[in-house]
Image (cartoon, grey):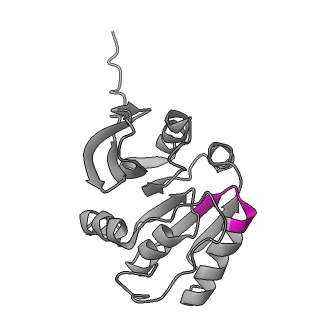
């Protein structure tokens, strides 16, 4: 596993050594960031189910303003920290350990993300709950990318998210959602 492009290009990242964690392949990560090339620079990014932190670190390498890493596993949180230190990344990020939906519920109301990268376990039962929670934290027009098993059906909508694109590579798939902007209510005319 390595950082593909940007400021930290070529840096090797440590992969998890315990069973049950499946890091995003470099090939899939390259496809993902090629599609997001115009979105990442200056973005506020959420790396949900962070694992090794490879997606968030790639976003930082490509100019993201900040990344919030979220993972419930203490081993993953430690691995994200180790990979950040190995790349020499000292700021522009936060690592929050906790269950994904609960963490998002506890963030300040005004906290919004331009880009969310979610890589939950492929067998996770409640994808809808994670997508709805992330939807509530997206900036208007924000993009959420869900990595999933290629054979798994993903919802067309979740909260204010609408599925816009799917990409399949081997056993993995990427579902690209956009946050639907809700127009401000029009001022009521006096009767």
Residue drawn 39% across the image and 39% down it: 152
63 up-or-down from 40: above or below: below
Q: Position of residue 64 (x, y in %)?
A: 42, 72
Residue 57 in the image: above or below residue 87: above
Residue 64 seen in the current view: no
Viewer-nearest residue: 7 or 19: 19
Residue 10 in the image: x percent, y percent?
41, 89
Q: Position of residue 42 (x, y in %)?
A: 39, 71
Q: Nearer the viewer, residue 159 or 27?
A: 27
Q: Which residues are magenta?
A: 69-75
**For this view, does 111 lie left or right of residue 95?**
left
- Res. 75 image quadrant: bottom right
Residue 33 occupies which quadrant of the picture? bottom left
* Quadrant of the frame with the C terminus: top left
**Frontmost residue, 132 versus 156:** 156
Seen at 51% across and 40% down, the residue is: 136
Name the residue at 32% across, 63% down.
32
Question: Total marks drawn?
Answer: 0
Rendered position, 4 above or below 115: below
Apparent side of residue 133 relative to residue 186 in the rendered image (left or right): right
Any part of residue 29 in sight: yes
């Amino acid at each position: 596993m390595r950082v593909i492009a940007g400021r930290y290009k070529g840096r090797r990242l440590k992969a998890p050594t315990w069973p049950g964690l499946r890091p995003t392949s470099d090939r899939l990560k390259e496809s993902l960031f090629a599609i997001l090339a115009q979105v990442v620079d200056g973005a506020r990014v959420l790396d949900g189910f962070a694992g090794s932190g490879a997606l968030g670190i790639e976003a930082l390498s490509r100019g993201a303003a900040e990344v919030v890493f979220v993972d419930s596993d203490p081993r993953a949180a430690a691995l994200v920290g180790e990979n950040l230190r190995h790349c020499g990344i000292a700021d522009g990020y936060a690592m929050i350990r906790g269950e994904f939906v609960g963490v998002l519920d506890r963030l300040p109301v005004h906290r919004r993300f331009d880009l969310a990268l979610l890589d939950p376990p492929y067998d996770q039962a409640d994808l809808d709950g994670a997508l709805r929670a992330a939807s509530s934290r997206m900036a208007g027009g924000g993009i959420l990318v869900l990595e999933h098993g290629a054979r798994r059906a993903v919802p067309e909508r979740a909260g204010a998210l609408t599925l816009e694109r799917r990409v399949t590579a081997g056993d993995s798939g990427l579902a690209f959602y956009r946050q639907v902007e809700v127009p401000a209510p029009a001022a009521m005319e006096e009767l």
